[in-house]
Amino acid sequence: MASTSAKARRLEKLKTALENNPFLTDEELARMFSVSIQTIRLDRLELNIPEVRERVKQMAEKSYAELRSLSGSEVIGDLIDLELNRSGISVMNINEDMIFQKTGIARGHFIFAQANSLAVACINAEVALTGTARIFFKRQVKLGERIVAKATVKGRKGNKYIVGVESKSGQEIVFEGTFIIFALSDKEATMQ
Amino acid sequence: MASTSAKARRLEKLKTALENNPFLTDEELARMFSVSIQTIRLDRLELNIPEVRERVKQMAEKSYAELRSLSGSEVIGDLIDLELNRSGISVMNINEDMIFQKTGIARGHFIFAQANSLAVACINAEVALTGTARIFFKRQVKLGERIVAKATVKGRKGNKYIVGVESKSGQEIVFEGTFIIFALSDKEATMQ
């Protein structure tokens, strides 16, 4: 039957889509596949894929276990993926506390804090501190947007790491930054 | 009498010192002039100069009245001085909420937030947003330190401002940053 094979193809594509981007909501998936949200829910049930909140939670539990340089509450946003000295991903929802009253635009330092704490989280050391950063706010971010930050450790020289962070809302880049992070032992940090 | 003229000289110097740096505490002044804190207090009384807290408060009241691009509570730290499109000064005390649990070192994004919000505060526009920044964390800042940030508008091209910020703890530079800030009208900001 045509409808069954259409469904089978959709299930296959849905699986791939969520592997590539586990942050897609049912609403976004419904738009993507031109079906109802209810259909997406049933598809997920059939594929045994939990809803976005639960997916993110499961990823977070794995990631926080990896964390060395920060305690969990010190990461701004939710840490979703972490491979020490390689990469990390965090998600932050822009809430009322993060915006300018006049315009509803997110304040730069929250976007910065998410990126900076993610860059620090990526470092495999007891203590890691930001030395310098070059940052670009690419477009305004508004109340309710969900910012996904991806950090990549680009290079290392002794205890000095170069970490690139790209933050997106949907497919759009809203922030880019390059951070130089210094890894210290506990001892070095308290002696300074 | 020698002692009277010594006192007169001290009063003159004290006045100049506080004009140059109104954030000096009685403790710091006592050390500077090799006298007791009590002596400094009496000197201030004679000169009719209030204590540091009151001085800062008086400066802040004037400065917040100037503010255009931010509402008062949106400046991170206490705004102490503000000359629109020219310069600004803010003071922030590093408290328990701003430090890494492990090391007691201040988290970079608070130092950044103070500097960035001060840079934005300096702009004479309804709405001002950070475009890019180049920042340097020069040394670690610990719990209890008082950070004085000074912003200077270095240049302007149309609606684009270059603002330099230098943050010090005592005489030591702890942070330096250059911010590119875009001034927008209310309309432009909500339309984007």
Image (cartoon, coloured by chain):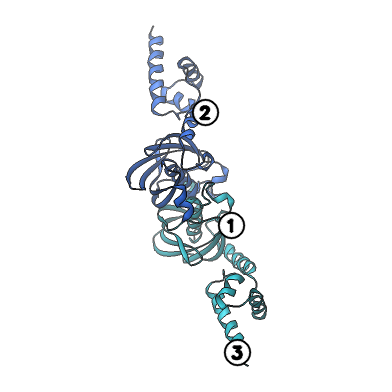
Chain colours: A blue, B cyan
Q: Chain of mark 1?
A: B
The residue that mark 1 highlights is B72
Q: What kind of residue is marked 2?
A: Arg
Q: Nearer the viewer, residue A18 or B72?
A: A18
Question: Left or right: B3 with respect to A130?
Answer: right
Indicate the chain on which mark 3 is placed: B
Q: Residue at x 36, y 44 (%)?
A: A164
Q: Report x, y in % for residue B95.
A: 58, 54
Instruction: Kindly identify the residue that appears in the image at 48 percent across and 57 percent down.
Output: B115
Quarter location, residue B2: bottom right
Question: In the image, which is nearer the foreground, mark 3 or mark 2?
Answer: 3
Q: Mark 3 belongs to which amino acid?
A: Ser
The amino acid sitting under disc 1 is Gly
Subunit that carries the residue with mark 2: A
Instruction: Indicate the quadrant where residue A152 lies.
Output: top left
Mark 1 residue element: helix
